[in-house]
Amino acid sequence: MLVGTRTILRRIEQSDLWRLWQWHEANELLLLREVKPHLSWDELNERYAELFAWQGAFLAEKKDGPAFGIYEYRDLNWKNRCCRVSMQLIDTSPEHALDALQTMTAFLFDELGLFRLHASVPVSMVFENEILKCSGFACEGKLREAHFTDGDYHDVRVYALLREDAESTKA
């Protein structure tokens, strides 16, 4: 469990699956969409251990309230000391979203000793793009029409945060 100033990031438990399923149905939860575009409720329950056995996906909760999203890291590259981070937020404030992201990045830099984090976010996810910028991630470029959703292709912004940049924003 990772504890921030306003938020808690904790491992996804089987009791959370119904909430994730509801988010997926209403908002196309990317965490589940990456696994399989059309994942049934029964299949999600059957594959829980396989999908969430690793430590990289966290359910983000307000300290004083309900869960509001998922933060995850994956594709750890120990040689280059980097990984990909992602988040999908459901109805939350910028303060909670930012605190959760900063809590996870601190863990990745301080506890895992990583040097670089990177994220790819569809342009249509405006809130997530703003949270990355506010937390110090620099936009490194754009992948044109790289994400297909709602019957159309959308651009994807690519961001990165280096340990030294994160340390300079702390000071």
Image: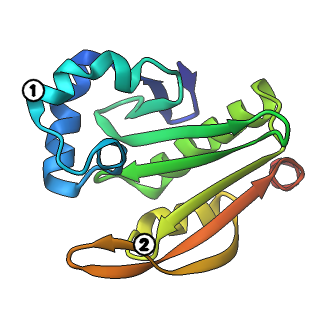
At 19% across and 34% down in the image, what residue appears?
19
Q: What element carries label 1?
A: helix
Examine the rendered structure and indicate whether residue 32 appears above or below residue 94. above
Q: Distance between the residues labelled 2 and 1?
A: 32 Å
Q: Which of marks 2 and 1 is in front?
A: 1
At 45% across and 76% down in the image, what residue appears?
123
Query: Camera-side residue: 1 or 22?
Result: 22
Q: How crowded is mark 1: few (under 14 residues within 10 Å), some or many (20 or more)?
A: few
Q: Do the residues labelled 2 and 1 touch (CB within 8 Å)?
A: no
* Numbered circles on residues, count: 2
At 21% across and 56% down in the image, what residue appears?
27
The part of the image, by quadrant, that contains residue 132 is bottom right
Residue 46, horizontal then vertical, whole percent: 19, 19
Q: Which amino acid does label 2 sit on?
A: Val
Q: Residue 126 carries which label?
A: 2
- In the drawing, does residue 21 fall left or right of residue 132? left
Residue 20, horizontal then vertical, whole percent: 23, 36
Q: Is mark 2 on a helix, strand or loop?
A: helix
Q: Which colour scheme is used?
A: rainbow
Q: Which amino acid does label 1 sit on?
A: Asp
The part of the image, by quadrant, that contains residue 65 is top left
Residue 101, horizontal then vertical, whole percent: 57, 45
N-term-proximal mark, 2 vs 1: 1
- In the drawing, does residue 119 fall left or right of residue 26? right
Q: Which mark is residue 42?
A: 1
Residue 37, horizontal then vertical, whole percent: 24, 51
- In the drawing, does residue 21 fall left or right of residue 111? left
At 84% across and 43% down in the image, what residue appears?
80
- In the drawing, does residue 21 fall left or right of residue 84? left
Q: Which mark is residue 63?
A: none
